[in-house]
Image (cartoon, rainbow, N blue to C red):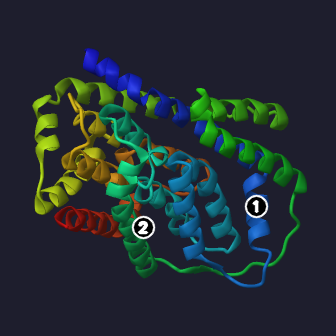
Amino acid sequence: MSRAADALSAIAPALAFLCTGVPLAALLDRLGFFESVARLLQRGAGPVALWKLWGLAAATTAVLNLDTTVVLLTPLYIRLARRANVDPLPVAIVPLLLASLASSFLPVSNLTSLIVVDATGAGVGDVVTRLALPSLAAVAGGWLAYRRHFPNFLPPTGPEAVDRRAVTIGGAVVSALLVMFTVGPVVGVDPWMAALGADVLLVAITRHLPWRSVPVGTAALVAIVAAFTAIVVPTSIAAEVQQVDGPVALGGLVIAGAAVANAVNNLPATLAVLHDAHDPTNGIWAWLLGVNVGAVLLPTGALANLLWWSIAVEEDVPMTLARYVRHVVPVGLPALGAAAITFAVAAAV
């Protein structure tokens, strides 16, 4: 039971952000922020290149974190697609994909990386040295796969009036959030606290309380899975993963980590291999890469996926497991393969 308590304690901040992030997106949407920003971005006569949206999502994930990408970019990309009169789902999955593919560049990009750094004593330089190149391969490989399956441009739209109030207020809130997401942890303010503060402010401004948007059931389910995984997974598995070495074995471990993450969520999958970990071994790095990059393949793979799903439903994007898999797997799987091969080659040399 102590292992279950430790697991719940580790994922509590992520669950709190899940419950505050969905209402945050709903409130910004109620304010009209996303629609106004979409109109600003599409005021020109030319089409919008999807590679720019891909790059923006990758940079947001790498520099800030994956939850920021999902909360702030998913509604915006849906608005861009709808204004261009195209199916919003292929555009909406861009932040979803990059929330995983670009989440291993820095420790702050993903809570799983922060957990590994804290448990093993690794530094920012260790993360960059071991995972930056495979992450870059995942982002590039994912884009090559994406451009083969989905449109590369959004058609141009005519200029429309922009709600300056929504842009001003929403822009100020988002700017403050980005600052707090970056420097808040240094002064003891978790991202969920910043999101909750923004929620309270926006409720006062919009006079709307989106209580139905809080994904309490989803958070409870993830907590149960995390506790159950901590109880039933033998500690001997952690030692076996930590001792894995050799290029082929490490490449396979990246794939295995992704598979486990999609089965039980990437947070408990990460915690399961850190028992008695004192040093960041090659096996731990390979596993971390897999649970980060490969977690996007199924909705259960990461809390960011569930956060994205909730926002997509809030935005009236038809969503089923079959639609999710059909759009995500053809891009996410090649990206995972590119990351695994790059990690294996780097380990060999």
Q: Which residue bears the numbered disc 1?
A: 37
Q: Earlier in the sequence, mark 2 or mark 1?
A: 1
In the image: residue 72, left or right of residue 259: right
Dot 1, crowdedness within 10 Å: few (<14), some or many (≥20)?
Answer: many
Q: Residue at x 62, y 52 (%)?
A: 315
In which quadrant is the C terminus drawn? bottom left
- The secondary element bearing badge 1 is classed as helix
Q: Which residue bears the numbered disc 2?
A: 139
Looking at the image, is 64 positioned above or below residue 6? below
Q: Residue at x 51, y 68 (%)?
A: 90
Q: Position of residue 81 (x, y in %)?
A: 63, 69
In the image: residue 25, left or right of residue 115: right
Q: Nearer the viewer, residue 272 or 222?
A: 272
Q: Position of residue 301 (x, y in %)?
A: 35, 47
Q: Amino acid at mark 1?
A: Val
Whether residue 78 can be seen here: yes
Q: Position of residue 219 (x, y in %)?
A: 45, 31
